[in-house]
Image (tube, helix red, strand yellow):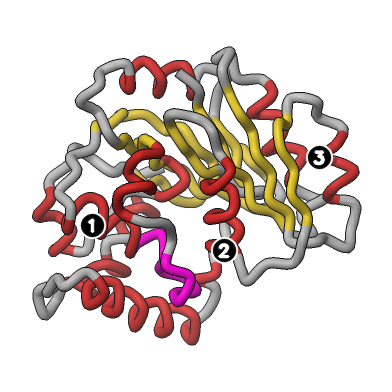
Amino acid sequence: MTVSIITAAFNSASTIRDTLQCIAEQDYPHIEHIVIDGKSTDNTLSVVKAFPHVAKIISEPDNGIYHAMNKGISIATGDIIGILNSDDIYTHPHVITNIAKIFEDSAVMALYADLQYVAANDLNKILRSWNSGPFKRKNFYYGWMPPHPAFFVRKELYTNYGLFNTNLKSAADYELMLRFLVKHRVTPAYLPEVIVKMRNGGISNANFKNRWRANREDKQAWKFNGLEPYFFTLYLKPLRKISQFLIR
C-alpha cells in the first residue's frame, strides 16, 4: 500500500527543509512524496531537489494553495493521500507506518489524528494543542472539525466525491471534510496521537478580516453541500479554538 503525501509550497525556502526532512525520515517504505510549487522566486526548488526521496515536482504558477493540492491529488498514484504543507512537520518517523497499519482494514476510508500549533521560529514551543477526540458526526453541528494536516483518505474518495473547491480561499479544507464526513457519511478512524506540528499563522486566523471571511466561507461550505447548520454552528467553530490554548 502506497501513501502519497502532497506538499504545496511557494517561496518556502525558510521552512520546507524541515518538512522534507521529516518525510525522508519516515520508516514506512512505500511513500510517494509530491511537491507542488507555485513558481517560487527564492531557492525553494533548490532545497527540494536536494532530497532524492521526492518522487514528483511541479513548479508553475497556480491559483492558490487548494489549486496546488488538487494538482497533487490528480497526479498521485498512492492508495492513501495525506497533505503536509511546507511549514508543517510530522512529529516522529513512525507516523506513516502507524497510519498505514490502520488502513490495512479495508473498511477504513479516512483517518484523522491530533495536531499541535508551534511557534514559527521554534518547533518545540507549543502554542496550541488540537486534540480532536473520537468521531461523532453530530459534532460538526457544534463547530467541530478534524485538523486537515492530520487527515488522510483513500484516493477513491477524491475520485468519487471530488477535489477541493477552489472557489473558497480559506475554508476549502473544511468544505471537503464536511462533504466527505457529513454529506457522504464517511466514518473516519481516529488515531489519538499528535502526528503533526504546524507553524502558527494560518491564513484564516491571521486577522479579524480573514476570520470574518473564513466565517462567511464556512457558511458557504454548508450551502454547497445542501446541508443546514444550526443557527449557532458557525459561531461555535472559532470559539472551540479557545480550549486549544488551555491544553498543551
Quarter of the image for residue 12 reads: bottom right
Task: Check if residue 171 falls in the magenta segment.
Answer: yes
Q: Earlier in the sequence, mark 3 or mark 2?
A: 3
Distance (Cα) linking label 3 and label 2 = 20 Å
Find residue 30 and report its horizontal and vertical position in percent.
56, 17
Task: Indicate whether 53 appears above or below 224.
Answer: above
Looking at the image, which is closer to me, 52 or 196?
Answer: 52
Find residue 59 and report its horizontal and vertical position in percent.
78, 54
Distance (Cα) linking label 1 and label 2 = 25 Å
Q: Earlier in the sequence, mark 3 or mark 1?
A: 3
Q: Which residue is mark 3?
A: 48
Frontmost of labels 3 and 2 is 2
Identify the mark at residue 67; answer none if there is no mark: 2
Residue at 50 percent of width and 27 percent of height: 3
Overall secondary structure of the magenta section: loop
Quarter of the image for residue 221 reads: bottom left
Q: Residues within 10 Å of mark 1 (few under 14, many from 20)?
A: many
Frontmost of labels 1 and 2 is 2
Looking at the image, which is closer to me, 163 or 153?
Answer: 163
Q: Which residue is mark 1?
A: 144
Magenta segment, which residues? 165-174
Three-letter residue code for mark 1: Trp
The reply, left or right, for residue 184 in relation to residue 73 is left
Distance (Cα) linking label 3 and label 1 = 35 Å
Three-letter residue code for mark 3: Val
Q: Are marks 3 and 1 in contact (CB under 8 Å)?
A: no
Task: Indicate whether 1 appears above or below 181.
Answer: above
Three-letter residue code for mark 2: His
Q: Earlier in the sequence, mark 1 or mark 2?
A: 2
Q: Is residue 125 visible?
A: no
- Label 1 sits on a secondary structure element that is loop
Indicate the quadrant containing the C terminus: top left, top right, bottom left or bottom right.
Answer: top left
